[in-house]
Image (tube, rainbow, N blue to C red):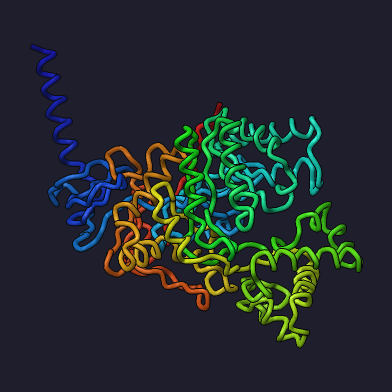
Amino acid sequence: MHHSFYALLICLFTSFFSYAQPYDLVIKNGRVVDGTGNPWVYADVAIQNGRIARVGTIPPAEAKRTIDATGLIVAPGFIDVHAHVEGSLEAQPGAPNFIHDGVTTVITGNCGGSSSNLKTYFDSLRMQKTSINVGSLIGHNSVRLKVMKMAFREPTAREQTDMEALVEQAMKDGAVGMSTGLIYTPGTYARTPEVVNLAKVASHYGGLYASHIRNEGQNVKQAVEEAIQISREAHIPVEISHFKVASKPLWGKSTETVELVEAARREGLDVTVDQYPYTASSTSLESILPSWALADGDSAVLIRFRDPATRMKIRTEMLESLKKNLRKNYDYAVVASYRPDTTFNGMSISAINQKLGRKSTAETEADLVMDLMERASLKRIQMVYHTMSETDVENILRYPNTMIASDAGVSKFGSGMPHPRGYGTNARVLGRYVRERHIIPLEEAIRRMTSLPAQRFKLADRGLLRPGYAADIVLFDEKTVADRATYEQPHAYTTGISWVLVNGTPVVEDGKHNGQRPGQVLMGPGFGK
């Protein structure tokens, strides 16, 4: 009798307490697209302690705060699997360009470039606090640079062991996998076996291999095959970064590169891709030089530029590359950010050449590229390259295993002429390719931005609107969501996204960033092992 009485009291107290403690926040009357790819449904979403507590019909009395989502889509926060936020996020922890585009999580450390000490990097992010969640890969280029500097050769056995130890430590420190930038120095100096052995270490800790492949133009098929070979030999899932065909003679061949990925999947290899929905890429000016010319450090590069015979050899190889890509000059290469002379920002190499009163030939423009690099003391010059076709962009977007990614950092509003993808990637998919061009349905686009990336990078409690999951949520109007950033005027935030919640905390309210920084550092599967 005594025990029954106490049990009844506990039961009554628990019932009263749960009734007296309403949900922190309830999103009502929205059309829920849950991230699975299933059709939208009308439902309310309740949030408690930063997590989704319930999805269904929830009485208004059960909410401390209510957001009326009438007329809006309620979706999981977008996960950008290919970002470069090192440095720029610390400068702008609010990450406004990402947040306004509905992005609640980014994966950084791509293209082979990451912090070489992820523990320190993660600790600093936690201390500073950010508006977005961050996970990171360990970059092969950063690892190779630390062990071998800019050496253009294979590693010794000791150097390979040292690189493997750095990858292992990074995986234990929480990396989600390893990335390569096989088109950039010093990664381009690595042969496939070096990468395979490093990828094996990442695989051992449950990580993934993300690659900016060795070539995205003339030899794109061989480069895709190399990524697949690394998957096969290292027994590791592979993510091919910003999948594209960046060579005029090969426009339309994306059907063939997608088929290479599908064939690998039929073989049982876990290969997927990501894409930004634009026909221009963005990377450094040095990427159009032959990689041998950039070996062994800055002083060696300057000696090559200044030696007439070597300079002629560099120029000749640059012109051969132009010819192979059916281009007469460098009018496709536009400066995004040039610190020594900001008047060059937004101008093509051809236009700068003319502005300086130089002879209008490809040879003179190739020389100008080297001159610009030397004037900038060989510091990175960010470019926008117009090299792709709309047909290929749409072909790749139709492929069900394509994720959406910006390949961007945190943009400083008004600074330089960056690629518009830094502001509008997700909205561009939802506005242009879903609403206007009907390339993929809304629910499918959201799956590519949410549950597919979460599954891919083993973010176990993200990417779905499901009880128990982190409350990363975006509310937008599917009729008006649009990217406003253009190549000519890149500094413009997305419109039509009215609310963004990160870990249950509103960061964008009625279209305005409120300065909150509830982001978390997301650990990979090898953390603490």
Residue nearest the viewer, comparing 112 with 292: 292
Counting from the top left corner in percent of width and height, residue 241 is at 54, 50
The answer to whether residue 104 is above or below residue 196 is: below
Q: Which residue sits furthest left?
A: 1
Counting from the top left corner in percent of width and height, residue 221 is at 58, 49
Position of 264 with respect to 510 (left or right) is: right
Counting from the top left corner in percent of width and height, residue 231 is at 56, 36
- The quadrant in which residue 290 appears is bottom right
Q: Residue at x 87, y 59 (%)?
A: 299
- The quadrant in which residue 439 appears is bottom left
Would residue 514 be visible to someone looking at this image?
Answer: no
Count of labels shown?
A: 0
Residue nearest the viewer, comparing 141 with 95: 141
Counting from the top left corner in percent of width and height, residue 86 is at 60, 53
Q: Residue at x 60, y 73 (%)?
A: 416
Would residue 20 be visible to someone looking at this image?
Answer: yes
State which quarter of the image contains the C terminus: top right
Residue nearest the viewer, comparing 473 with 157: 157
Position of 140 with respect to 9 (left or right) is: right
Q: Residue at x 78, y 63 (%)?
A: 317
State which quarter of the image contains the N terminus: top left
